[in-house]
Image: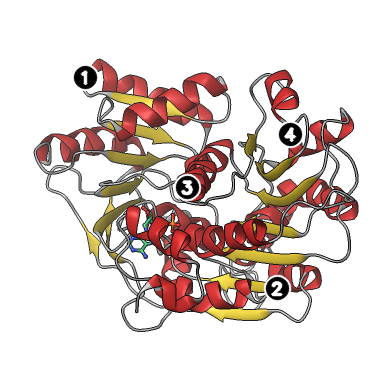
């Protein structure tokens, strides 16, 4: 099915073709006609399955079809707002929109507005308003507070990685932004994951939405092989070095996820000292450097990036064959996004997780959420020696005789339960 049968104009069908897209993906085939009709939509589809184009193409078409109204508010007018959780994702979505928009006869003004860089050039760019702004929530609010932008004429709102934007780290900012938007608007929410706890919040934003969920449809699952290697926590860096060495010719680029900024620094430094081109990537690194690292990684100037969950969402790194979970993510949702950095656009990928005695139970939770079992492997020379910490049964009908759950155990159980349903608040963006 070609793109023009979805109702796209020849210019935008041509834009898709120019990007090398022969046919729409499942999410594009389902979402584009509904968006063109002006419907609200919640779109759920696997990582790497073309969600960006699914909203970008119809969004451009609708804006191009309706010339900016001269009556709509002031020179600070904005017509469409795309919110994303990270600066890198904003830049990426901005590039996709610019690439497609180049094929339109009308010129649309597209502005990326993110934090971590000077606000002044963004304020200058916004003079006279804009057709589309792609922003992270904090900087968008700063721009509104500086009177650089008014949101009262926004007719289309896109929340990309929507569930992340609704979770605690962003909820307050998102609430403030929603309050500034006109009630009459088209809302488009996209993500690979919509945890149940978030769904109700998300649905409150939508009006009579079309719900598109192409997960589980034949041929839509990303082709990612998952492996789990049992290893003691203190041997992981050595194991990582060995794996990188063994696969030097085949793993062009490797993205390694760790739990903290500190771990990103130390693991990267240790690898670098051992002759591996590894670099840390996290929210405490200056924005210019962050952008450079990502661009250089895409150009193969770094072999390994050691990242926090800052890199877990949305990033589209072509030919990234391997993702490694040095530390497991805190929630099964984050796991889906992390491993989804590989196996994109129909390519195959490999995701390896290091599992220690202490994290085995957590990995089982991740497996359960996906409804699959990943066989545990052991690598010669790295056989684990640690034993699992004693688990106290908090159900009250078993566990260790005479031991009652301590406050700490209860807290741990509560945290594990929360991690099951939502992502904990994080500031690393
Ligand atoms: P996304 O999920 O939007 O990040 O897209 C993942 C990757 O798939 C990107 O590299 C897109 O360029 C690519 N892509 C999107 N739509 C198509 C399509 N219809 N055919 C082929 N590749 C696509």
Residue 274: mark in rendering: 1
Return the disc, 4 or 1, that comes first in the chain's sequence: 4
Q: Earlier in the sequence, mark 4 or mark 2?
A: 2
Identify the image quadrant of the N terminus.
Answer: bottom left
Where 15 falls versus 107 (above or below)?
A: below
Q: Which of pointers 3 and 1 indicates the residue nearer the eye?
A: 3
Helix, strand, or loop for circle 4? Answer: helix
Q: Please report the residue visible at 41 percent of the width from the left and 78 percent of the height from the top.
A: 371
- Earlier-in-chain disc, 3 versus 4: 3
- Tell me the distance, in whole angstroms, between the alpha carbons under discs 4 and 1: 39 Å
Q: Residues within 10 Å of mark 2 (few under 14, many from 20)?
A: many
Would you identify the image quadrant in which residue 178 lies?
bottom right
The residue carrying pointer 3 sits among few (fewer than 14), some (14 to 19) or many (20 or more) residues within 10 Å by Cα, namely: some
Q: Does mark 3 have its CB less than 8 Å from ligand 1?
A: yes
Does 187 sit left or right of 320 as displayed? Answer: right
Name the residue carrying label 3.
96
Tag of residue 412: none
Residue, disc 2: 40
C-alpha distance separating marks 3 and 1: 37 Å
Foreground label between 3 and 4? 3
Q: Secondary structure at mark 3?
A: helix
Whether residues under marks 4 and 1 lie with C-beta atoms below 8 angstroms apart, the answer is no
Q: Ligand 1, what quadrant?
A: bottom left
Read off the residue under disc 4. Answer: 139
Using the image, determine if residue 426 lies above or below residue 24: above
The picture places residue 56, in percent across and down from the top left corner, at: 54, 57
Marks 3 and 1: CB-CB under 8 Å? Answer: no
- Percent x, y for residue 182? 88, 58
Q: Are marks 3 and 4 in contact (CB under 8 Å)?
A: no
Label 1: element kind: loop
């Amino acid at each position: 099915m070609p793109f023009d049968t979805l109702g796209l104009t020849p210019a935008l069908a041509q834009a898709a073709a120019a990007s090398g897209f022969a046919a729409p993906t499942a999410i594009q085939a389902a979402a584009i006609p509904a968006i063109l009709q002006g419907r609200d939509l919640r779109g759920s589809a696997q990582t790497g399955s073309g969600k960006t184009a699914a909203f970008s193409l119809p969004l451009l078409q609708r804006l191009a079809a309706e010339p900016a109204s001269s009556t709509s508010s002031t020179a600070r007018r904005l017509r469409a707002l795309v919110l994303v959780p990270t600066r890198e994702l904003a830049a990426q979505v901005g590039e996709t929109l610019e690439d497609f928009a180049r094929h339109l006869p009308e010129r649309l003004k597209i502005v990326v507005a993110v934090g971590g860089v000077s606000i002044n050039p963004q304020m200058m760019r916004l003079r006279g308003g804009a057709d589309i702004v792609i922003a992270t929530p904090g900087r968008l609010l700063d721009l509104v507070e500086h009177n650089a932008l008014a949101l009262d004429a926004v007719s289309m709102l896109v929340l990309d990685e929507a569930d992340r934007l609704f979770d605690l780290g962003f909820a307050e900012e998102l609430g403030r932004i929603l309050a500034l938007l006109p009630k009459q608007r088209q809302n488009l929410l996209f993500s690979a994951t919509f945890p149940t706890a978030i769904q109700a919040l998300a649905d409150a934003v939508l009006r009579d939405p079309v719900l598109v969920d192409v997960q589980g449809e034949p041929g839509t699952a990303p082709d990612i092989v998952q492996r789990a290697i049992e290893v003691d926590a203190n041997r992981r860096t050595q194991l990582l070095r060995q794996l990188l060495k063994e696969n030097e010719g085949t793993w062009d680029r490797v993205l390694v996820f760790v739990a903290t900024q500190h771990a990103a620094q130390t693991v990267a430094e240790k690898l670098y000292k051992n002759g591996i081109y590894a670099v840390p990537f996290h929210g405490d690194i200056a924005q210019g450097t962050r952008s450079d690292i990502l661009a250089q990684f895409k150009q193969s100037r770094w072999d390994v990036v050691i990242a926090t969950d800052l890199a877990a969402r949305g990033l589209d790194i072509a030919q990234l064959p391997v993702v490694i979970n040095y530390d497991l993510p805190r929630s099964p949702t984050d796991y889906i996004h992390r491993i989804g950095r590989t196996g994109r656009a129909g390519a195959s990928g490999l995701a390896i997780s290091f599992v220690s005695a202490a994290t085995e139970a957590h990995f089982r939770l991740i497996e359960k959420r996906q409804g699959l079992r990943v066989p545990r492997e052991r690598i010669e020379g790295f056989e684990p020696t640690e034993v699992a910490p004693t688990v106290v049964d908090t159900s009250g009908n078993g566990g260790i005789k005479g031991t009652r759950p301590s406050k700490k155990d209860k807290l741990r159980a509560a945290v594990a339960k929360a991690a099951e349903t939502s992502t904990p608040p994080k500031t690393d963006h």
